[in-house]
Image (cartoon, rainbow, N blue to C red):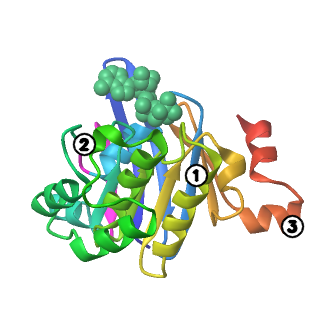
């Protein structure tokens, strides 16, 4: 097991953004994190990534209580843009290399090449799809074990979405774990191992995609419609 949360809570004033959240994640799996707007997905990811403190509850990373050192193995990609307009692709690589000890510049160069991003391109000239690809490539160039990608497929066209999915699947292996939050259930249905359904800050169902399909004849979209 790579991650476990036990009775995890996060409140903002009276609002329970994450409420008694219990989850177990395993290496070698790709998870889809599904839930309506405001259901607590981002807040949960930020707690696991060490960007916001839980109000109460436990996070266990690789069988030990979460420690700030674990941040170096947990790569979080937020929904917000995080590059400056004046930067080139090469600058983004340098910026990441300065920031993250585990950043692999060579891997970044190979991956940017593969998706058609040239070193000299300036951020301000990139299309929305190219920027989305750059965000994913920069995050995945870290040698992390747990990747938390907050809405990596939002607001981009079909081709860019397919490219991002292929980048993610190329990087997924038996030692790492991916959690992808999205509202685009149909796009992720075919490749996620498990779906995690979140409602009002709580995990209400965690289930295997293949099992649902084979044993119950249900798609993740069917289940979403039933329980949300
Ligand atoms: N810093 C904050 N201060 C106050 N309330 C917050 C804060 N961050 C999140 N919330 C509230 O917590 C709840 C959960 O928000 P969160 O962003 O985690 O949901 P989400 O599932 O990621 O939503 P979306 O799919 O829209 O991104 C929402 O009601 C939100 O308004």
Work out whether mark 2 precedes mark 3 in sequence or the reverse, and give the earlier one. Answer: 2
Task: Please tell me whether residue 190 is drawn above or below residue 187 in the rendered image.
Answer: below
Q: Are marks 2 and 1 in contact (CB under 8 Å)?
A: no
Sequence-earlier tag: 1 or 3: 1
Q: Which circle marks residue 161 in the picture?
A: 1
Q: Residue at x 77, y 67 (%)?
A: 211
The residue tagged with tag 2: helix, strand or loop? loop
Q: How many marks?
A: 3
Say which quarter of the image contains residue 143. Answer: bottom left
The tag on residue 96 is none
Mark number for residue 215?
Answer: 3
At numbered mark 1, what does the secondary structure look like: helix, strand or loop? Answer: helix
Q: Secondary structure at mark 3?
A: helix
Residue 155 on the magenta span? no
Q: Nearer the viewer, mark 2 or mark 3?
A: 2
* Residue at numbered disc 2: 83
Residue segment shown in magenta: 50-62
User: Is disc 2 surrounded by few (<14), some (14 to 19) or many (20+) residues within 10 Å?
Assistant: some
């Amino acid at each position: 097991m790579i991650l476990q949360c036990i009775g995890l809570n996060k409140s903002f004033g009276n609002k329970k953004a994450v409420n008694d959240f219990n989850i177990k994640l395993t290496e070698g799996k790709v998870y889809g994190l599904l839930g309506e707007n405001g259901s607590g997905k981002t807040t949960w990811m930020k707690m696991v990534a060490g960007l916001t403190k839980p109000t109460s509850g436990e996070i266990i990373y690789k069988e030990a209580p979460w420690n700030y050192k674990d941040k170096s193995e947990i790569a979080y990609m937020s929904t917000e843009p995080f590059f400056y307009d004046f930067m080139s692709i090469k600058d983004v690589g340098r910026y990441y290399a300065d920031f993250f000890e585990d950043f692999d510049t060579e891997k970044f160069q190979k991956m940017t090449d593969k998706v058609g991003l040239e070193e000299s391109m300036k951020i301000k000239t990139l299309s929305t799809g190219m920027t989305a690809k750059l965000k994913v490539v920069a995050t995945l160039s870290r040698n992390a074990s747990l990747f938390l990608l907050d809405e990596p497929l939002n607001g981009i066209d079909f081709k860019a979405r397919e490219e991002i999915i292929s980048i993610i699947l190329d990087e997924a292996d038996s030692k790492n774990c991916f959690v992808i939050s999205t509202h685009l259930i149909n796009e992720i249905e075919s490749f996620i191992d498990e779906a995690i359904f979140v409602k009002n800050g709580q995990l209400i169902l965690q289930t295997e995609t293949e099992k649902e399909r084979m044993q119950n004849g249900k798609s993740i979209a069917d289940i979403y419609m039933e329980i949300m």
